Amino acid sequence: MTEHEIRTQRRDIQPCLILFNGFPGVGKLTIAKNFQAVLEESRIPTRLIDNHVLIDPVEAIEPGRSPAHYALRKAIRKAAFDGLKALEGGVVILMTTCLAANQADIEVFKEYVEIALARGIQLININVSCDEATNKQRLCSEERREVRENGGKMKLVDADVLATLRREHVLLDASAHLSGGEAQGVNIRQCQLDTSSLSVEEGVHGVFDLFCLN
């Protein structure tokens, strides 16, 4: 499907919170940015919050993974999430994250649920994935390295760290890892998007396809 065909399809996206959840380097932010561009061409108001917007200031102030680091991350998330809760209605909120199926990350996921609850909107958790070879290739791309080396985002570019993450963790699945009580009555949809063989345009089309599924 061409970019023109994607951009001329009918758009009927209601206000919601979409999480692009995946390991580093799978293409979460690239797809989210391009998805946002199509929505805005259709005059659908959006906000896009990349996880590095929340993480990088903490890493600069409290590098490492100390208790102080995690406390500051939670404080920054709270300030940002309170701002999202207070936005005027009609906005589609797009966020990237990397949440695994462990108790600490489930607790963080509940903070996203609270945004949806406060705004009275659906939460769509899209687990973005790709095969390990493709993931490594994207992670170690020259473009990604340049972003990090030129003082940009503190993106992971270490293939060994990625291999450990993939080996030791499974992405959080809201349908499998949350109880009804933890969902707080919010309508949560769990989706999967494998980008292994997809172009950026095809990945964006795949996101739109998810809205056609019941």
Image (cartoon, rainbow, N blue to C red):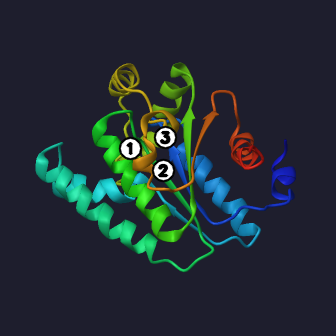
The amino acid sitting under disc 3 is: Ala
Q: Tag 1 or tag 2, which sits nearer the N-term? A: 2
Query: Which residue is rendered at x = 32% and y = 47% of the image?
Result: 107
**Residue 156 at x, y percent in the picture:** 37, 38
Which quarter of the rendered picture does the C terminus lie within?
top right
Q: Which residue is mark 1?
A: 155
**Image check: 14 left or right of 185?**
right
Query: Which residue is rendered at x = 75% and y = 43% of the image?
Result: 213
**Residue 181 at x, y percent in the picture:** 41, 49
Q: Which residue is mark 2?
A: 96
**Residue 131 at x, y percent in the picture:** 56, 22
**Residue 83 at x, y percent in the picture:** 40, 74
Which quarter of the rendered picture does the N terminus lie within?
top right
Q: Are marks 3 and 1 in contact (CB under 8 Å)?
A: no
**Which of label 3 and label 1 is nearer to you?**
3
Q: Are marks 2 and 1 in contact (CB under 8 Å)?
A: no
- Pick the residue in front: 47 or 178: 178
Q: Is residue 191 placed above or below 84 in the rendered structure? A: above
Q: Secondary structure at mark 2?
A: strand
- The answer for how far apart the CA atoms under marks 2 and 3 are is 15 Å
Q: Is residue 91 placed above or below 181 in the rendered structure? A: below
